Amino acid sequence: MLKQHLQLKLGQKLAPQQIQLMKLIQLHTLEFEEELERELEENPALEIAKEDSKEDEYSSLEDSYENEGTESIETDFDVNEYLYDDEPSYKTASSNYSPDDEDFDNESLLTEGQSLYDYLMEQIHLVNITDEDVKIAEYIIGNLDTDGYLRREIKSIVDDLAFSQGIYTTKEKVEDILENYIQKLDPSGVGARSLQECLLLQIEKKVSSDKAVSLAANILRHQFDALTNKHYNKIIQKYDIEEEDLKDALDEISKLSPKVGGNFDTQTITINQEIIPDFVIQVKDGQVIPMLNSKNAPTLRVSEEYKDILSTYSHDKNSAEHKQAALFIKQKLDAAKWYIDAINQRQNTLLQTINAIVKFQKDYFITGDEKSLRPMILKDIADITGFDISTISRVVKSKYADTPNGILYLKDLFSDSLTNDDGEEVSTKEIKTHLQEVINKENKRKPLTDDALVVILKEQGYNIARRTIAKYREQLNIPVARLRKEL
């Protein structure tokens, strides 16, 4: 049986304006500029204000119609909402310029490069081979990854050629085209099926009469496992050579590229994007001054033309078409106001956040020494600003700051803390800096093991477990001791 009853629920919903603000906050400068351009194209009621625009961007239109007996059309909104001149200026205009914005140049931010696929296709079409072989070669090139390697099995390529291209060939034929045509193309090493083959293809194109080059080729061909594991004594004994000879050979190998397609992007155009700092941090007379870099965000305002049109439509309260048009214009004007307000809130949120970060890490910005970094987590900044942790996370995401010590990724300023022997909290970044310095100074002939690093850092006052040392070492992209060994 159906029953009727009352139920009390507590819920929370984000308004469209809040969602829009959250999206704007997490955009970095270049994305923000693109988003701004899209909004200007989609909403004609939003426009860029001219430099000589007056402060009263939202001036009243009442005076133009006060003697005409203008009446508002009957809608569910108030047309006169747009006809008052006492609206706060921040509601209808947004000035996003910083006094130091001239320091940044927006020219040549994007450059196009040729893809590896196109580069190889140009070359293969200049080779004197049959039309069918060209099609097989094109298919092989299409299967190369961004590093220039052929990761697929030859048998799979043979099957694909038969099913998708209608070309029936053999494994031997495909291997012949790969080895005698594709692998002869530039850059050297392209079309390799393994790192060993990639390096061999490059070394074999060098002058073979050179002793170091010949030895390097032999090592790559016959002692690759010993080389990768840095078993140098085994190689010296195998070839009965001096240590200096091995050093010369290793020097030749170090000049080879493990990723010959690194300067290309397979089947797509490479876009080289310059980092545009979202913040500018200056140090003057011991004071750290943070600012927004907002050159790419022009001053916005609500369109005067659209406000005039809305006022004009208010003359005819009986026309359904005019009523519908007025509703459309009102929606666009609302959207423009909301957007300008969201931009101002975005700026305010970013500024408050960077001010809190600078205040928290003042010593670091003044000295530039990572050892001066204080342990800092998102909650610390959230407590200072009063914002939610998720908001702080959105602010620092993908954001960079131009500091006296170079371009800095904001997220790098955040780290957990550990307690040293003196009972003081130190940043994990400080510990990593010490770890890096110890490894940089080690004897490369006998690199320090993780156990040895534990002892050294403990002597410096950092009581850290071996597994933590291993974790930090991996985060710093430092290999194990065996792989750090050098002659």
Image (cartoon, grey):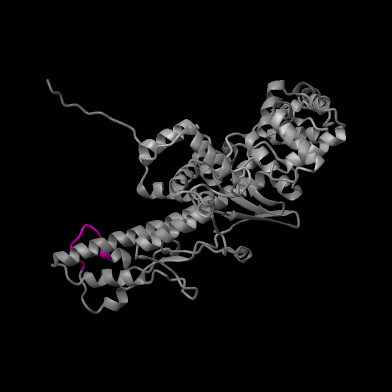
Relative to 244, say whether 363 is above or below.
below
Q: Position of residue 35 (x, y in %)?
A: 44, 56
Query: Relative to residue 396, is residue 4 drawn left or right?
Result: left
Relative to 33, say whether 422 is above or below.
above
Query: To which quarter of the image does residue 240 belong?
Result: top right
Query: Relative to residue 432, is residue 10 drawn left or right?
Result: left
Res. 371 visible in picture: no
Q: Quadrant of the C terminus?
A: top right
Going 60% across and 64% down the picture, which residue do you hit? Answer: 105
Q: Position of residue 320 (x, y in %)?
A: 14, 64
Res. 364 visible in picture: yes
Going 14% across and 67% down the picture, which residue do you hit? Answer: 319
Going 75% across and 28% down the picture, which residue do you hit? Answer: 230
Q: Position of residue 243 (x, y in %)?
A: 86, 32
Query: To which quarter of the image does residue 68 belong?
Result: bottom left
Query: Relative to residue 264, is residue 472 drawn left or right?
Result: right
Residue 77 belongs to magenta span: yes
Q: Which residues are magenta?
A: 72-79
Q: Position of residue 241 (x, y in %)?
A: 85, 30
* Most frequent secondary structure within the magenta stretch: loop
Q: Nearer the viewer, residue 276 or 6?
A: 276
Number of marks in the rendered image = 0
Q: Nearer the viewer, residue 482 or 189?
A: 189
Q: Nearer the viewer, residue 110 or 132?
A: 132
Q: Quadrant of the N terminus?
A: top left
Residue 476 belongs to magenta span: no
